[in-house]
Every structure is written in structure tokens, then in C-alpha cells.
Image (cartoon, grey):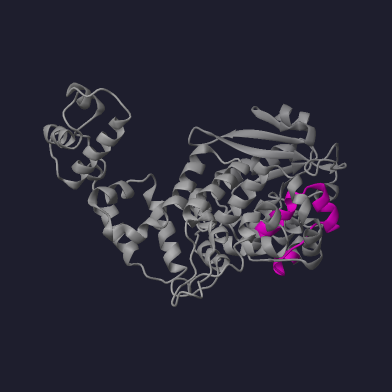
Amino acid sequence: MTEQWGENAKYVAAREIVVALRAAGHKAYFAGGCVRDLLLGVEAKDFDVATSATPDVVMGMFAKTYSVGAHFGVILVCSPDEGGGEIATEVATFRHDGAYSDGRRPDAVRFSIDPREDVQRRDFTINGMLFDPLAGAGEEAILDFVGGREDLIEHRVRTIGVARDRFTEDKLRMLRAVRFASRLEFEIEPATAVAINELAAEITQVSLERIRDELTLMLTEGHARRAFELLYERGLLQYVLPEAVKMRGVEQPPQFHPEGDVWVHTMLLLEKLKPGSSPTLAWGALLHDIGKPATFRPPDPKKPGDRIRFDGHVEVGVRIAETILARLRFSNEDTEQTIALVKNHMRFGDILQMRESTLKRFLRLPKFDEHLGLHWMDCMSAHGDLRLYEFAKERYEAAPVEEMRPKLLVTGRDLIAAGYRPSPQFKEMLEAAEDAQLEGVVKTTDEGLAMVKARWGEPA
């Protein structure tokens, strides 16, 4: 079963740690997601080790370690990489968890030497199996005390033990259940699903950063539509992103959106997000029409041929998106790009009528490839007309950087040297000079200054 890992450096490092722990008389196994991925035939991202050795013993056995949660029995063991770097492997001591009074971490833990006891405190059966990398490649290498193998076969996400207890311990597990079910294309086992619906309101006890990170993973792992449909079905969406729930049932003009309401349209966009999509593009896709519910205007029966309108939905959407991103504590950089996607997504409709200078300013927006990506998804989730997309893509890919963002012919220093005193009007003058340059109207600094003088007069 381990052939797929081959010479994976992380696998080799983790296996060597298991070898060392076993040689010292301790139990040690691979644990968690890497075992699940092994059985699914998927490349594991990380290899975690579970052991009977206590944290102080682990730290004493290896040359370079970090205590990242010694109170909970978690140590990082660093192994040298062939490339000159390091591979960090998480090594956790078998343990039994006490009460979870904060809904996140156990108040106290008791270390154990029994792997059966250790897996009982984990979240889902598919994540609760152990693997012995020294036992060969047969079935005997898998230690399954919780029925994880059967749940993998049945494509089922099920908690270990009583679902309500597991979710009460750590509320984030409710979001993780949705993420695993969507990513693996599994179903949430009925008792587990019922418990999520009953406890959904308690997700608000989880830190906003943890919620943000789980939602971002859902959006970027390749099954975003299913994830957000599950969030709604399990009653979680109204607590983690209530603004998104408001998109449901908001009708759109069928001549532009034959696919259905705003929610359906947005889900179709999420369906087109590929695994590994950037978080900003993914959030831009989710939020691009978030302003429509608040700006919905039905057809005026007194005006024949009138249609549904969303006047000002972009501006309103920007404000709502800013509120959401601030609430979820996104970085300034990610916020700026996501807001730019929301703010500019309707500008493609005017792209054929743009002046050359306006078009070049549009095409040089930071990460314009994400604007293109969002527009493609927007079109393919509605009318399917890609003419504007193809025009923008062709111009964007054909234009050299020096044409899109040339060295300015007229700068603030040039205006001062010409006799103009610095003032708020400088910005308008410089933008006009740059527009003329981008249009090809002026080709030298003297021509640019002459244009400024013609419009604003000689300096006082």
C-alpha cells in the first residue's frame, strides 16, 4: 500500500522517527489523515506520528525538536532534508482528553500507552485509523479500532463515538465534517448530520480566524459548491456567513440569468473553482453578487417590458464584502484584492466602449488574471457569452508591460519645474497627462506639459 509514497521525503522522515521510537521500546504509528489518504490512494500532505513516548522522552531522543503543544503531548521533530532544509513531523503522545469547557481544547489531558484509548478522542472514524509503517504493505499494517475502513468504503463521514459529544468538545468539527464530506464526495452519516443541525448555533463559539480558515479550505479544495450547499443544509451557513443565505430565492432577469436566482448563480461559480484556486479568487466568486439581495427591484408593472434590476449592487456589495472580510479578519492584502474583484466585476460589460487609456488602466489592475477568471466563471454560470472575456484576454496577453504601464512622461517634478505650485489639482493634471500618454496623443514630456497648459492655463 505504501508504493504510492515511494521516496516521499516526509514519509521517509516520519518512518525513521517511528523506527527510532520502536527501537527505544515505545509504540509508534502513523496517525490521522495520512492513513486515510493511503487507503484512498491519495498523496498525503503530511505524516503525523502517534506514540506511547511522553513529550519529554520525544524531545530527549531527537536532535532538533520544538514544543508546539507539550501540554497536549505534541512535539515537532525536525529532520534534515536532502535539499538542505528541514522536514517537521508532528509527534503526539497517546492521550485521553478531559472536558472541553471552551469548546475548542481539552482543559486537561492524561497521557496513555494504549493506542485504542488515543483514537477514541479523535474526530471522525476516517481520521481515527493508525498505520504501522514497519509491518509491511498488507492489511495487518492498519490498526482500525473505530470502523474507519468500513466508513471509507461506504463513503461516509461519521464521528467517533457519540456525535453530539464530539461536536460539543470542539465546535469546529462541525465545519470539518462538511469539508471532508464535500472534498471526499462522501455523505455525512445521519446521526452525525442531525447533531450538526442541533448544535449549529454553537459554531459562533469558534474563533473567527478558525472559521475563516475552514471556509477558505472549502472554497479552494475543488468542491466549493457542495461544501456551501452542505453548510446551508446543516444549518451552519446562517451563523458563519448569514449574508450568503440572503442570496437564496432572489430572482434575476431571465434574459441575462436563465440559470436561476442569485444563490443558484453563485453556486454555479463555486462549482467552477478548481482545486488550488487562490483564496482571493474563490472569495471573489462567492461575494461578487453579495449586494444583489439588498438592491433587488422587481419589474414596474406600470412600465411595459421593465425587468428586475439591481441598481447599485456593486457599491452595496463592496460595503457588505468589506464587513465580511473585516469580521473574518482577513489580511489587508487579501481584503484589497477580494474587494477589487467585487468592485470591478461589472466593468467587463463596458470594455468595448472604453477609451484606450481607461482600458489600459483596467487591464493593469493587480492580479488581472483573477479578474479574467472571475469574469469567465460569471459568464459561464449565466448566459455563456464569452465575447467580452475573449477580447479582454487577448488584449491583456498581447500588451507588453511597457505599453500598459509606461514610464510617465509628466511627473510632479515636471509640473513644479514648469512653474506650477503643488496643489490638490496636481492629481487631476497628472492623470490627464497619463491618459493622453496611454492614448498615444502625447509622446514627449514637452507635449504632455503643453496639454496641461492648454487645459489648466499657464502657471501663476
Q: Tell me: 43 left or right of 391.
A: right
**Residue 52 percent coordinates (x, y):** 80, 40
Residue 62 visible, this orientation: no
Q: Nearer the viewer, residue 68 or 335?
A: 335
Highlighted magenta segment, given as a residue range: 151-180
Q: Tell me: 15 left or right of 298.
A: right
The N terminus, quarter of image: bottom right
Q: Nearer the viewer, residue 227 or 448?
A: 448
Q: Residue at x 74, y 39 (%)?
A: 92
The C terminus, quarter of image: top left
Residue 164 shown in magenta: yes
Q: Residue at x 78, y 36 (%)?
A: 72
Q: Residue at x 62, y 43 (%)?
A: 327
**Residue 307 percent coordinates (x, y):** 47, 72
Residue 125 shown in magenta: no
Q: Nearer the viewer, residue 340 or 24?
A: 340
Residue 37 vertical position relative to residue 57 in the rendered view, above or below: below
The quadrant holding residue 58 is top right
**Residue 300 percent coordinates (x, y):** 50, 72
Residue 390 vertical position relative to residue 453 in the rendered view, above or below: below
Q: Residue at x 58, y 67 (%)?
A: 250
Count the marks: how many? 0
Q: Nearer the viewer, residue 371 or 357?
A: 357
The quadrant holding residue 3 is bottom right
Q: Tell me: 62 left or right of 414.
A: right
Q: Residue furthest bottom?
A: 304
Residue 451 visible, this orientation: yes
Magenta segment main secondary structure = helix
**Residue 445 percent coordinates (x, y):** 14, 32
Residue 238 vertical position relative to residue 154 in the rendered view, above or below: above
